[in-house]
Amino acid sequence: MLVALPYLRISFNTPIDGRDIPMFRGAVAQAAGLEHELFHNHTEEGFRYAYPLIQYKQVSGKPSIICVGEGTQAISHLFQAGRPYDLRIGRRQVAMSIERLDARKHPLQIWDAPIRYHIRRWLPFNTESYAAYRSKTTEAERRELLEAVLRGQIMAFAKGVAWKLPPKEERPVVCRIQHLSEPVRHTIRDARLLAFDATFETNVSLPNLIGLGRHVSIGYGVILQARKKD
């Protein structure tokens, strides 16, 4: 069954360094109002442990905000703010303007044929899955585990946007990794994490530029559908 997912991409015209994306996120959340938790995924009790519906990216060297599901409605708090694009990023006061606005409905569906995607700076592991990865003795075993992790993250995305997948006995989610880079260590909030670039195929239609894995709200695990010539 096809589901139409609300999707919004807001791209700004001012170049930004990729390492400044967390500060960009903080500045946008401050401008929109910290009482709106979808901008920063913090609650009075701690963290909002659910798929981020507002995500912050660097695309072609410039900052973008990707909103899905309820995030497309919550972003209105940013537009309603006084001067929402005059942001303080670190020590800089940055005046931004919108360069591109892409609002549409993305068709969520499980297809018969696989769709190929690239994913960059993918952080697949939590403590448990990393221990399992370290315990594997062959590359084939490690890739099989990573495919299972990625499949679970696709299903977590579906749950996060309130898309009820069909029973796996009827239409299982399929995920196959075609290419996997060597891991690169990234330090995030004093934690050293393994990141991969990969190409994978899945039978699930996913929106471009959403994230899968950890820290997707600050630009990790960004996916892009591969062009046919790829």
Image (tube, rainbow, N blue to C red):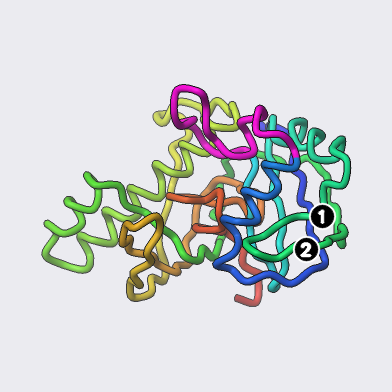
Q: Disc 2 on helix, strand or loop?
A: strand
65 over 96 or under it: above or below: above
Residue in the foreground of this view, choosing between 146 and 68: 68
Q: Determine the main secondary structure of the stretch shown in magenta.
A: loop
Residue 58 x, y percent position in the rendering = 65, 64
In whole angstroms, how far apart are the C-alphas of marks 2 and 1? Answer: 6 Å
Between discs 2 and 1, the one toward the N terminus: 1
Question: Does the magenta segment cover residue 162?
Answer: no
Determine the image quadrant of residue 189: bottom left
Q: Disc 1 on helix, strand or loop?
A: strand
Given contact means CB atoms under 8 Å apart, are the residues at marks 2 and 1 in contact?
yes
Question: Does the magenta segment cover residue 52?
Answer: yes
Residue occupying image coordinates x 22% and y 65%? 140
Amino acid tagged 1:
Asp
Residue occupying image coordinates x 45% and y 41%? 173
Please give the range of residues in magenta.
32-53
Q: Residues within 10 Å of mark 1 (few under 14, many from 20)?
A: some
Determine the image quadrant of residue 110: top right
Residue 152 x, y percent position in the rendering = 39, 41
- Residue receiving disc 2: 94
Residue in the foreground of this view, choosing between 64 and 29: 29
135 over 170 or under it: above or below: below
Residue in the foreground of this view, choosing between 178 and 111: 178
Q: How crowded is mark 2: few (under 14 residues within 10 Å), some or many (20 or more)?
A: some
- Residue receiving disc 1: 86
Residue 186 x, y percent position in the rendering = 38, 66
**Image quadrant in which the C terminus is located:** bottom right
